Amino acid sequence: MKVAYVFALPRSASYKLAQMILPQLEAGTHGVDVAGMFFFGLGHRFGQTSLEG
């Protein structure tokens, strides 16, 4: 099964990625294929750093 994650708030996105999703993906235990991750409401600063990175 494929899933897409939608994050609306910076704090929840940071927590869920760092504590839940990324460790499972790195360990190969996530259980589903991640089709995409979408970030909304994170402000202009995030857009700049993601384009520069």
Image: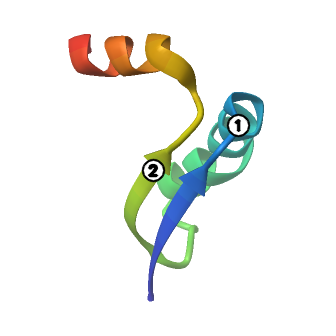
Q: Most extreme residue toward the bottom, as rendered?
A: 1
Residue 4 coordinates in the image, percent (x, y): 47, 67
Closer to the camera in the image, 39 or 21: 39
First in sequence, mark 1 or 2: give its number.
1
Which numbered tag is attached to residue 17?
none
Asked which quadrant contains residue 24, the reply is bottom right
Residue tagged 1: 9
On the image, the x and y values in percent for residue 9 come to 70, 37
Given residues 44 and 32, the one toward you in this image is: 44
Question: SS for tag 2?
Answer: strand
Amino acid bearing label 1: Leu
Q: Is residue 34 left or right of residue 20?
A: left
Figure quadrant of residue 34:
bottom left
The N terminus lies in quadrant = bottom left
Q: Residue at coordinates 38% horizontally, 21% vertically from top-left?
A: 47
Q: Splitting the image into 4 quarters, where does residue 52 fall? A: top left
Q: What crowding class fits label 1: few (fewer than 14 Cα within 10 Å), some (14-19), or many (20 or more)?
A: few
Q: Say which amino acid is labelled 2.
A: Phe
Q: Tell me the residue at 66%/39% (across/down).
A: 13
Pinpoint residue 7: horizontal percent, then vertical percent: 61, 48
Residue 5 higher or lower than 11, as above or below: below
Near mark 2 (Cα within 10 A), the count class, few <14, some 14-19 or many ≥20, is few
Q: CA distance from mark 1 to mark 2?
A: 11 Å
- Tags 1 and 2 touching, CB below 8 Å: no
- The correct choice, above or below, for 49 with respect to 16 in the image is above
Query: What is the secondary structure assignment of the residue under circle 1?
Result: loop
Left or right: residue 11 versus residue 24 is: right
Q: Is residue 40 above or below residue 11?
A: below
Q: Which residue is mark 2?
A: 38
For the view shown, which residue lies furthest in the left direction?
52
Q: Residue at x 26, y 15 (%)?
A: 53
